């Protein structure tokens, strides 16, 4: 059972890391402006977090789930929310760096 938990935990963090790297690469090579891309990403992320919260709150009403399952799902939601915030912060930093480099290039 413990190995299975480690497997799913590793799978989850691998997926989050892959999403973060994919997001950053997408931002670097995106055909749209950084602001447009940032607004699209933040909108989708907010909808995903809201949906995850709705699912979690709905599961609270369902007597079939044990307290342990509720606790684990809340941990996953909190972890996903924290990772999403980190990804957005990294994306914002990258966008600012790119804008700064473009401004320096234009001055030269």
Image (cartoon, rainbow, N blue to C red):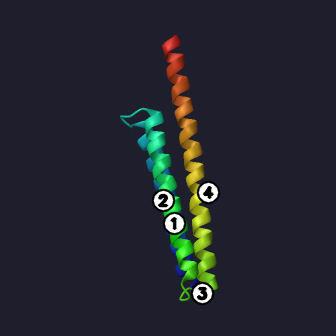
Q: Determine the residue positioned at 51% across, 66% down.
A: 52
Q: Mark 2 sits on what residue?
A: 48
At which x and y percent is residue 63? 56, 88
Q: Mark 4 sits on what residue?
A: 82
Which mark is in front, 1 or 4?
1
Q: Are marks 4 and 3 in contact (CB under 8 Å)?
A: no
Q: Are marks 2 and 1 in contact (CB under 8 Å)?
A: yes
Q: In whole angstroms, how far apart are the C-alphas of marks 1 and 3?
A: 18 Å
At which x and y percent is residue 75? 62, 70
Q: Secondary structure at mark 4?
A: helix
Q: Mark 3 sits on what residue?
A: 66
Q: Nearer the viewer, residue 47 or 105?
A: 47
Q: Are marks 1 and 4 in contact (CB under 8 Å)?
A: no
Q: Are marks 1 and 3 in contact (CB under 8 Å)?
A: no
Residue 102's place in the image compared with 74, above or below, is: above
Q: Secondary structure at mark 3?
A: loop
């Amino acid at each position: 059972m413990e190995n299975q938990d480690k497997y799913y935990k590793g799978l989850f963090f691998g997926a989050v890391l892959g999403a973060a790297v994919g997001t950053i690469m997408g931002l670097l090579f995106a055909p749209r402006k950084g602001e447009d891309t940032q607004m699209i990403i933040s909108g989708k992320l907010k909808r995903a977090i809201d949906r995850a919260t709705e699912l979690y709150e709905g599961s609270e009403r369902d007597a079939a789930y044990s307290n342990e399952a509720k606790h684990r799902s809340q941990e996953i939601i909190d972890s996903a929310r924290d990772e999403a915030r980190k990804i957005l912060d990294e994306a914002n930093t990258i966008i600012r760096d790119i804008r700064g480099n473009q401004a320096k290039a234009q001055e030269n």
